[in-house]
Amino acid sequence: MALRVALNAPLALRYMKDGLRRSGPDLEDLGAWVSAAHRALFTTNDHREGVRAFLEKREPRFDGT
């Protein structure tokens, strides 16, 4: 399972780990962080590659940018 997780986009994994560390009772702060994280990740090359790979029905090649 760890290998499957490791094959995902590096930036998205970094944000996910950060989000898990931030999780707690204050859902308003967490929600604001999630919105900011989505805005940041949607502008990356990895996001564009993921969409392209999905549309082309192939495995993505993430580069962490």
Image (tube, grey):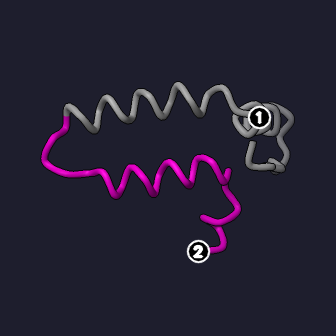
Query: Mark 2 belongs to which amino acid?
Result: Ala
Number of other residues with Cα within 10 Å of mark 1, as a class: few under 14, some 14 to 19, many 20 or more: some
Query: Mark 1 belongs to which amino acid?
Result: Asn
Relative to 37, 2 lies left or right: right
Q: Nearer the viewer, mark 1 or mark 2?
A: 1
Give SS at disc 1.
helix
Residue ID at (69%, 35%) = 47
Q: Main secondary structure of the magenta part?
A: helix
The number of numbered badges drawn on the structure is 2
Ranked by sequence position, the earlier of labels 1 and 2 is 2
Inter-mark Cα distance, 1 to 2: 23 Å
Determine which residue is flagged by label 2. 2
- Asked if residue 18 is among those painted magenta in the image, a careful observer would answer yes
Residue ID at (50%, 48%) = 15
Which quadrant of the figure has residue 50? top right
Q: Position of residue 65 (x, y in %)?
A: 75, 42
Per the rendered image, the range of residues in magenta is 1-27
